[in-house]
Amino acid sequence: MQRIVICLLVIFSGTLARKSSFSERDRLLLRLRQLIDLVEELNNYVNDLDPEFLPAPENVKRHCEQAAFSCFQAVPLKPAAAGHRQERLGWLSKQLTRKLPVAKAGGRQRASLTCPSCDSYEKKPPKEFLERLKSLIQKMIHQHLSQGR
């Protein structure tokens, strides 16, 4: 009887440990997919954004995705004029700046040492800025899924 209970406890604890490790990966993937939706919604408001040119990373090197994403997050998306859409744009911009769940430890330190600074990226109009942001997020999703295999 004791052996059965011990075996069940080991199996149960192993199942819990596996579920918790998957949840961190799933949280990051879920957040990245939410960001895709967010960028698509921001595209609907692109004509309401200030036409100021914004630094938009492109062709980001492997392991520099987090740093490039941080550059996108650091750029304030400002409405062109006050109006009824200003509040929605503010909320969308705030959602964009939320931190990503941590995927793995140590990756961020290595990336920050070898990746270009935000100032080094070419500045683009808001529409292209959003296109490049979406492209980067899609790349991050693809890499995230390919690491899980």
Image (tube, rainbow, N blue to C red):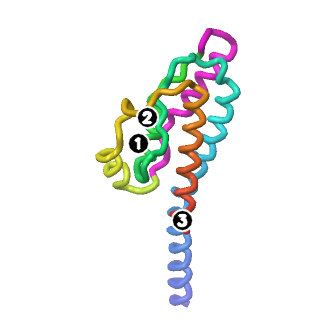
Residue found at the far left of this picture: 113
Q: Are marks 1 and 2 in contact (CB under 8 Å)?
A: yes
Quadrant (top left/top right/bottom left/bottom right) for the C terminus = bottom right
Dot 1: what SS?
helix
| Quadrant of the rendered image containing residue 81 | top right
Total numbered badges shown on the rendered structure: 3
Is residue 83 on the magenta stretch? yes
| Quadrant of the rendered image containing residue 92 | top right
Residue displayed at 44% across by 31% down: 122
User: Is 116 left, or right, of 97 in this rendering?
Assistant: left
Dot 3: what SS?
loop
| Amino acid on which the number 3 mark rests in the picture | Gly
| Amino acid on which the number 2 mark rests in the picture | Cys
Nearer to us in this view, 30 or 12: 30
| Quadrant of the rendered image containing residue 5 | bottom right
Residue bearing the label numbered 2: 71
Judge depth for marks 3 and 2 and give the one in front. Answer: 2
Alpha-carbon neighbours of circle 2 within 10 Å: few (<14), some, or many (≥20)?
A: some
Image: magenta residue range: 80-102
Q: CA distance from mark 3 to mark 2?
A: 26 Å
Residue bearing the label numbered 1: 67
Nearer to us in this view, 105 or 50: 50
Residue bearing the label numbered 3: 148
Is residue 44 on the magenta stretch? no
| Amino acid on which the number 1 mark rests in the picture | Ala
